[in-house]
Image (spheres, helix red, strand yellow):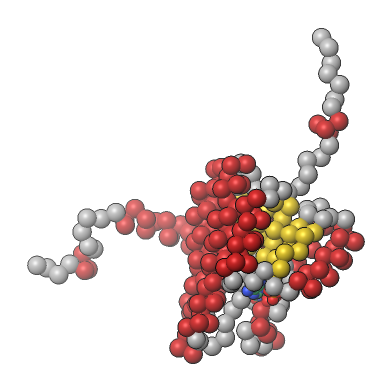
Amino acid sequence: MSIEPIREESITMAKKPSVLITGASSGIGATYADRFARRGHDLVLVARDGPRMEAMAADLRRETGVAIDVLPADLTKPDELAAVEARLRDDDGIGILVNNAGASLGGRFVDQSTEGVAQLVALNVTAVLRLASAVAPRLAKAGEGAIINIGSVVGLAPELGLSVYGATKAFVLFLSQGLSLELGPKGVYVQAVLPSATRTEIWERSGADVNSLSAVMEVGELVDAALVGFDRREPVTIPPLPDAADWDAYQSARRAMLPGFAQVHAAERYRTGA
Ligand code: NAP
């Protein structure tokens, strides 16, 4: 029996997938960039502020040695969004998408402009959807990869009075849960991350004072916790939720309703008695 010599390529570590992060110029996205670079992943950074990302990238390249591309884009502008979609579709090296870019909007619904709420949906919903749609078929075909979508606990809480922002985040959660069910069996991991108040620029950008809040998480702690959920392949990660059983109970209550939706007649309480 002859013994095959071990081929060098078989003992070379497989290259880690590149990570495309939107909203990478500050806050949660910049922190994901830092953490994935330190894990040895090459990066593609997307946001509007190119010079700010270039400065970040120069530091991270020096500190970690990973390759970093900066792709400035306003994700509310269809042609600039299309360029990011094309990168996700065509670059086989990208195996992880962090759909993080997002904004909030101050004021109550009747005071927010129609244009303002539509812009919020363009960034928080349409861009998230189009980028996931651009990358998912390639990942599914490869049978590996991950999509991380940044939602918010606000998407679970209409009581907070941030109706449009919360609605965009409810969309992100639902989309993530649906994609997780569809793509998980094909080898693609989909995670929804639901932060609560976290110290980033999002507050001042929307005219709010973060220091007026009773509890604010530091961004490093938030992202490190989200990455614990990522490494565990959790479909939904809520870093501030003290008891995971509360989320499980919520999901069980929702699922318990599903069989009852298949009905030929309206429920007794809606019958007109004709
Ligand atoms: P942030 O520091 O304001 O970061 C937002 C990022 O999105 C920035 O990199 C910004 O960069 C980018 N961005 C904004 N508008 C954009 C556009 N039109 N096109 C492309 N990029 C754009 O806020 P953050 O807290 O880290 O927010 C990240 C995500 O976390 C958001 O989806 C947010 O809803 C979610 N979240 C935050 C909190 C919180 O309390 N901080 C809580 C729950 C969920 P440029 O200005 O350079 O474009």
Residue 215: image location, x then y, percent: 67, 79
The answer, for residue 130, to whether it is visible in the render is: yes
Residue shown at 50% from the left, 77% from the top: 118
What residue sits 67% from the left and 88% below the top?
A: 209
Is residue 5 positioned above or below 262 on the image? above
Foreground pick, 248 / 171: 171
Residue 166 image point, x, y percent: 52, 74
- Write down the quadrant of residue 4 in the picture: top right
> In the drawing, does residue 249 fall left or right of residue 240?
left
* x 46%, y 57%: residue: 252
Quadrant (top left/top right/bottom left/bottom right) for the C terminus = bottom left
Left or right placement of residue 98 versus residue 261 in this view: right
Q: Ligand 1 sits in which quadrant?
A: bottom right
Instruction: Indicate the position of residue 171 as horizontal and vertical percent values.
Output: 50, 66
Q: Relative to residue 185, is residue 109 depicted above or below?
A: below
Residue 138 or 16: which is nearer the viewer? 138
Give the number of marks: 0
Query: Dividing the image into 4 quarters, which one contains the N terminus?
Result: top right
Foreground of the two, 132 or 106: 132
In this rendering, does residue 249 appear at all? no
Q: Residue at x 58, y 72 (%)?
A: 76
Considering every residue shown, the one lying at the far top of the view is 1
Outermost left residue: 274
User: Residue 33, how many percent across, how many down?
Assistant: 76, 63
